[in-house]
Image: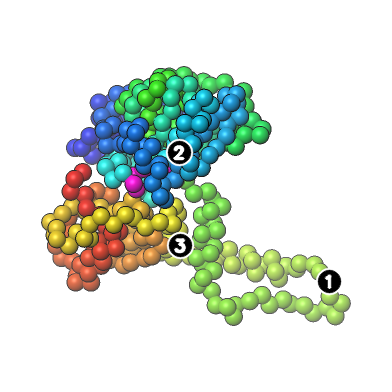
Amino acid sequence: MQQNKPNVFSGQKLSAEDFLLNYWQQKPHLFQDTCLPVDILPDRHQLFQLAEQEDVQSRIVYTEDNKHYQLLHDEPQAWDTLKHLKPTLLVSDIEKWWPSALALLDYFPFIKSWRFDDLMLSYAPTGASVGAHLDHYDVFLFQVRGTRRWQFDLQPVSDPKLVSDSDLAVLADYEPDEDHILHPGDILYLPPQHAHHGISTSDDCLTCSIGLRAPSHAELLMAVAEHMADQLSETARLQDQQKNLQADACLSTTEINLLRSLFTKVANASDEALAQAIGHYLSQYRSLDVMPPVETDGGKTRPTALWRISPFYTLVSYPLNSQQMQIFIDGEMTLCSEILGTVLSSQKPFSIDIPHLSQAEKDWLDMLIEEQILITADNE
């Protein structure tokens, strides 16, 4: 992995190769005193202001007994009335509403863009928590300000016991394997299904959760089946082989074999066909039902600007061959040259002044800028 730019491994004893081989999606790891910038994220007051904005998703979690946790959606103004109940404010999709926050992802160069879910920033006064719980995805817990105590397990939990009558899925009688205090710059990595419990140990505790989406096998199967089904003709229907004058309600081998043949067609589909199905799905897996804020003229007056994919969109790419690449954005597929496809899928800011592009590709880039699917990255 290239180390020419600072990243989460800079200054750490653990190398990127060792992390990916021995920790990634296997067991937790604590990064201490990393070089990740804390000043590109909102402070406590800015977080509350952000939560007040229309379309910004927020939650307040609170508890009366440190066992049962209640949840209040999109009502940050209720904070003062809940102060005595150890509340935590959580705001989702920070990277979409606070553009400078997007630069955090540059410190994790091994994460595919379509695996990224969102940056969630939480504020919690001393003693506040959201309870011991599991996540079904990888997460990096970045301590931004203040301190937080993290308790966590070294092995995944397969059969969790949950507290009843709680708005959140909180683990009952949790006994952790590890216990650490995180300071600004520290990061705790947790694979899926590893129990963890964070408790604020200061009144200025801000923690950024870098969540990585993990579609379930069921979701992937349904996405592929739906995509393949759209390719079938309406005239292709079940034809039974009934030959008995006395009908009954039994399924026969005819129906079973038909279903098996349909699954066989999916299993034998070309890599390109399966890539299209998955690309369509992953590129719109977590789209918000809101449009990005319009703040510029689309960049037409800045032809030398650097650009990146807007955090409101997800890009997935698939190389067809050495000359062509498929690009999926928000469920739509575009075929482009390998040159342009490589630039777009690099996950790095780029100039649109790319040599050897066709006029159609230049027009497509202009359209992406006009629709703010590409946004300027000059200030990063």
Q: Is residue 211 visible?
A: no
- Disc 1 is placed on an element classified as loop
Q: Is residue 229 visible?
A: yes
Viewer-side residue, 264 vs 275: 275
| Location of residue 67 with respect to 238 vertically, above or below | above
Number of marks present in the image shown: 3
How many C-alpha atoms fall within 10 Å of the one at disc 3: few (<14), some, or many (≥20)? many
Q: Is residue 247 left or right of residue 192?
A: right
Residue sitting at x 51%, y 34%: 61
Q: Are marks 2 and 3 in contact (CB under 8 Å)?
A: no
Labels 1 and 2: the sequence-earlier one = 2
The quarter of the picture where the C terminus appears is top left
Predominant SS along the magenta part = helix
For mark 3, what is the residue?
277
Quarter location, residue 167: top right
Residue type indicated by callout 2: Gln
The quarter of the picture where the N terminus appears is top left
Viewer-side residue, 361 vs 378: 378
For mark 2, what is the residue?
77
Q: How is the image coloured?
A: rainbow
Residue type indicated by callout 1: Asp
Labels 2 and 3: the sequence-earlier one = 2
Q: CA distance from mark 3 to mark 1?
A: 38 Å
Labels 3 and 1: the sequence-earlier one = 1
Residue sitting at x 42%, y 54%: 288
Relative image position of residue 32 (x, y in whole percent): 33, 23
Point out the frontmost of discs 2 and 3.
2
